[in-house]
Amino acid sequence: MVGPEPSLVDQRIIAALQGDLPVTAHPFAAAAREAGISEEELLDRLREFQKRGWLRRVAAILYHQRAGVTANAMAVWQVPEERVEEAGRRAAAFPQVSHCYERIPYPQWPYNLYAMIHGFSEAECRRTAEEISRAIGIEEPLLLFSQKEFKKTSMEYF
Amino acid sequence: MEGKLDPVDRQLLTSLQKDLPLVPRPFFHLGQLLGLPEEEVLRRVSNLKEKGIIRRLGGIFNSRGLGFSSTLVALRVVPEELEKVAARVNHYPGVTHNYARPHPFNLWFTLIGRRQDEVKAILAEIRQFEGVLDILVLPAKRIFKIGVKLDLVKPSEDS
């Protein structure tokens, strides 16, 4: 880990923000009370957290299926090592892609580029995967749709 | 889907997924951007939470930045044992997402732990679960994009 570790106050702030903020005019004031600091102090600390790379953002996480985005697929490609950087950037540029990673391949699993594709149907996800394949010049993506969601939650760090 | 989302809800959701501004009255600020009074933003957001469209409104932390270790894991599980293994995997608080996918590697989950050795210890336990035939530990080597920010403004009409 680079940089300082979260102090006890920092841990209290993270604990207050890893859950659900109230939908009120001053949502951060409630979190600040929980952490035992002022609203202003909390907002300053959160900006500092972002600079340190601890906090990506404060935002809404959706149940996409209930918002109508009913299909999601994990698409994977076998990309030669020297082309991964370029291919990853191109795949990540698609708005239908929420996450894009390079991961190490295995003999029994030779894929190394991963993109999570979301769409309003499976057909739409397949079309997106084909477009990405063309854009990165790698054929034959493997698409794994989610058959069943066993768990979807957020991490409780502290 | 429970209840249709109107265009204003879609705009609001698209905006809220990107970020809630770090200011004392973020919903007022959001309303300014979308041309809505604060009260209407609050009413709509509450409604979207009640409907279960918004799962959570809060901080999205970088587990690695906080010194935690995280990885994607795939298991090849005897199909008859899949539900049982999934439930046992879910039992770990560091498992945040867990899906069945149609492939010989049929169970896919993400695991976050305080340190690398904690993650390793959990994986060693899971490897021993009855019905688990093979395991792939797939930590990210490079991150090209992270964060679910889907455009809900224009649902496609043709599919």
Image (tube, coloured by chain):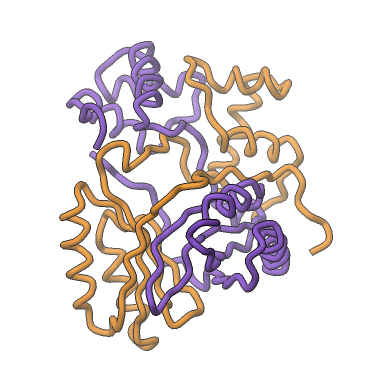
Chain colours: A purple, B orange
Q: Can I make out residue B1 in this image?
A: no
Q: Position of residue B137 (x, y in %)?
A: 32, 66
Q: Kindly give the residue lying farthest to the front in the view shown.
A: A82
Q: Kindly give the residue lying farthest to the right in the view shown.
A: B158
Q: Nearer the viewer, residue B31 or B120?
A: B120
Q: Nearer the viewer, residue A51 or A19?
A: A51
Name the residue rendered at 23%, 83% in the picture: B130
Q: Position of residue B87 (x, y in %)?
A: 31, 71
Name the residue rendered at 72%, 69% in the picture: A123
Name the residue rendered at 29%, 52% in the picture: B112
Q: Is residue B39 left or right of residue B72?
A: right
Q: Can I make out residue A9 in this image?
A: yes
Q: Quadrant of the N terminus of chain A?
A: top left
Q: Is residue A73 left or right of residue A132?
A: left
Q: Position of residue B56 (x, y in %)?
A: 46, 42
Name the residue rendered at 63%, 73% in the picture: A140
Q: Is residue B116 left or right of residue A153?
A: left
Q: Nearer the viewer, residue B97 or A85?
A: A85
Q: Position of residue A158 (x, y in %)?
A: 23, 39
- Quarter of image, res A65: bottom right
How many numbered marks have been drawn onto this rendered protein structure?
A: 0
Q: Is residue A126 left or right of residue A42?
A: right
Q: Is residue A34 above or below residue B98?
A: above
